Amino acid sequence: MSAPLGGDRLRIEATAQQGAALHITSAAATLALRGPTTEHATYDVHLSVADHAELRWLPKPLISAAGSNLRQTWTIDLAPSARLVLREELALGRTGEPPGRVTTRLTVRRGGHVLLDQEADYGPGAAGWDSPAVLAHHRATGQILVVDPDFETEPPAVQDLTDTPQDGLAVRTPLAGPATLVTAIAPDGLRLRHLLDAAHPHAGRAWTAVRDR
């Protein structure tokens, strides 16, 4: 979708009720654009997953076009027996153009306790976003978060998922809870997609539908 524009306020809420399986994707990429105002846009996603339910949030990439300014948040509440697969892909700028500004915040709570709380800031005005410590020359970044109670007995190990560093970098890390996080950076959105697609066999049963899009 050609939104959000500067000044837009978008909010999505979804709930997977007890025992349900909910799979959410999108028809095309989300394109953050400069709007008629210099005010930033917001895009807030609120997800809830009840006991013995499963939610797969697998949208197409977000593209941060030149001149855009977006603040995006995910707030996710999971019951103790809930399962989650969440995929995020961000391309900084369209082909041949500089990126816009995008700030993202992901907060995941399981059984009322914080499982993951992270924030990232990219583009003009963000401190150090293109330094060697963050993205360096790469212009696409993404992650897949999997929360699965099965990990309590079989926790995933840290694993480097990169075959060719020139095509990007990806690593899988376990979290302090029944969850694992794959984080990847790449020169462009296509190579980022290849990295994340290649990661899916490495994290257990909850990943079986990650590529069913």
Image (cartoon, rainbow, N blue to C red):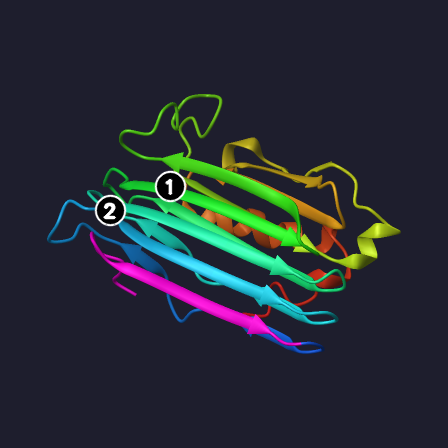
| On-image quarter of the C terminus | bottom right
Confirm whether the magenta stretch covers residue 13. Answer: yes
Q: Indicate whether 85 appears above or below 158.
A: below
- What segment is highlighted magenta in the picture? 1-17
As drawn, 1 above or below 71: below
| Residue at image coords 37%, 61% | 29
Q: Position of residue 112 (x, y in %)?
A: 66, 54
Considering only vertical position in the picture, is 32 above or below 167?
A: below
Amino acid type at mark 1: Thr
Q: Position of residue 180 (x, y in %)?
A: 70, 47
Using the rendered image of the protein, determine whether residue 24 is visible from the camera's viewpoint.
no
Residue 181 at what x, y percent from top left?
A: 64, 45
The alpha-carbon separation of the residues under discs 1 and 2 comes to: 10 Å
Q: Residue at x 70, y 55 (%)?
A: 147
Front-most of 185 and 168? Answer: 185
Q: Secondary structure at mark 1?
A: strand
Q: Is 205 covered by the magenta stretch?
A: no
Q: Which residue position holds label 2?
A: 40
Picture quadrant of residue 2: bottom left
Within 10 Å of the Cα at label 2, are there few (<14), some (14-19), or many (20+) other Cα atoms? some
Q: Which percent across, then down, holds residue 56? A: 59, 66
Secondary structure at badge 2 equals loop
Front one among 63 and 198: 63
Quick one: label 1, few (<14), some, or many (20+) residues within 10 Å?
some
Q: Which residue is mark 1?
A: 103
Residue 203, relative to residue 60: is it above or below?
A: above
Determine if residue 14 is in view. Answer: yes
Along the line of sight, the residue nearer the viewer: 126 or 157: 126
Q: Earlier in the sequence, mark 1 or mark 2?
A: 2
